[in-house]
Amino acid sequence: MKVGAIIVAFLLAVIGAGPALAQASGPARLQAAVAGLPRPAAIYVAGRGTPVPWGAAAGVAYPGAGGPITVDTPLRIASNTKTFTAATVLRLWETGRIDLDAPIGPLLSPSLNALLIADGYDTAAITARHLLSHSSGLYDHGSDQRFVEAVMADPGHHWTREELVGLSMAYADPQSGPGAAFRYSDTGYILLGDIVERITGRTLGVAVREELRLDRLGLTATWWEIMEPAPPGLIRAPQSIGGISAANWHASMDLYGGGGLIMSARDLAVFFAALFEGRIFDRPETLKTMLWQGDHSRAGHYRLGIFVSEVNGRTFYWHSGFWGTIALYAPDTGVAVAGVTVNQDGFVAMRTLAESIIGAPPSRP
């Protein structure tokens, strides 16, 4: 059976039949659907609308040892990390330690502030809210082909924050004025990571863990690469881009806030459910602020660290990651879904299956 047919069969048989059938027979049908995907993958379902969390996985995660992928296999989640970075900044706002609308100049390390100013950015006008909503005008070094080529040419290179931000300055000038338009930028989230460290006095990994109180959520396969030790007995699964292995690409190429976290499908789904169900922030107003929509151009599909899709009267919140990861939440049904794959070229099929579980539309940035 083709992948598309498997996904359609899963959707019709499980979701179309209603919550009771989904809960009773969902795991078995999901396992069959995941087994039909073109690359090893894992999907996990959680949330208040799911009385018993469930998931499925199929394929090999560790080629050398032949180890299978499971819903607890840890791997790099890349830009899914942005939701965690943003939520940490919102926790700092919630506790009165940052003004989201204050200029970023005084908040940044002087070296980073100098780089921005030298390239024509007005750090007296750019705010943390602009960085969070990708409306600062910053160029995205991460999506530039020259960056990918640089990483592939020297995969073991240890990148610093200043080097990565400097690449953005070297590749292009400001793309727009602050607050003018949505322009996705990893560079902006590197700046947010620096701000979090300066305000908290802790490494970004420790700050995120403590501010979001991740340990109380029971996330057993979650850590910030390099900044935190891996839990005992856990090894990050290698990831690939088609036929290119990225197993030895140094974590610093995507470490400082736009990426950096290692997680499993289970942990990612559990966190998304906790975020949208009131178990991360102390006040409901904080989540409402995170879901603020600006008035800048193309503001409709991104909030503060989270994408949003609206279709047929339903709202879906989500984020994806470069290596092939996605997390979604449907507030009307209280269902969170996370999916991961070890090869980027299996992402679209895995994502489509994950979205079908909650009836979400295709999620393209």
Image (spheres, helix red, strand yellow):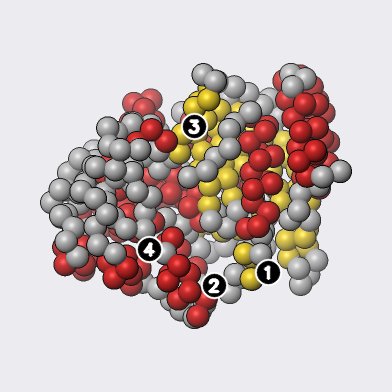
Relative vertical location of residue 38 with respect to residue 27 in this rendering, above or below: below
Q: Is residue 150 left or right of residue 164?
A: right
Question: Quarter of the image holding residue 255?
Answer: bottom left
* x, y percent for residue 227: 45, 64
N-terminal label among 3 and 1: 1
Q: Residue placed at 61% from the left, 42% from the top?
A: 338
Secondary structure state at the residue bearing disc 4: helix
> Dot 3, crowdedness within 10 Å: few (<14), some or many (≥20)?
some
Q: Quadrant of the N terminus?
A: top right
How busy is the neighbourhood of tag 4: few (under 14 within 10 Å), some, or many (20 plus)? many
Mark 2 lies on residue: 249
Residue placed under numbered mark 4 in the picture: 141
Using the numbered discs, state the Cα–Cα distance from disc 1 to disc 2 in whole angstroms. Answer: 14 Å
Q: Residue furthest right?
A: 1
- Residue 346 in the image, given as x and y percentages of width and height: 68, 54
Which residue is denoted by mark 1 in the rendering? 243
Q: In this orientation, which residue lies closer to the viewer: 156 or 245?
A: 245
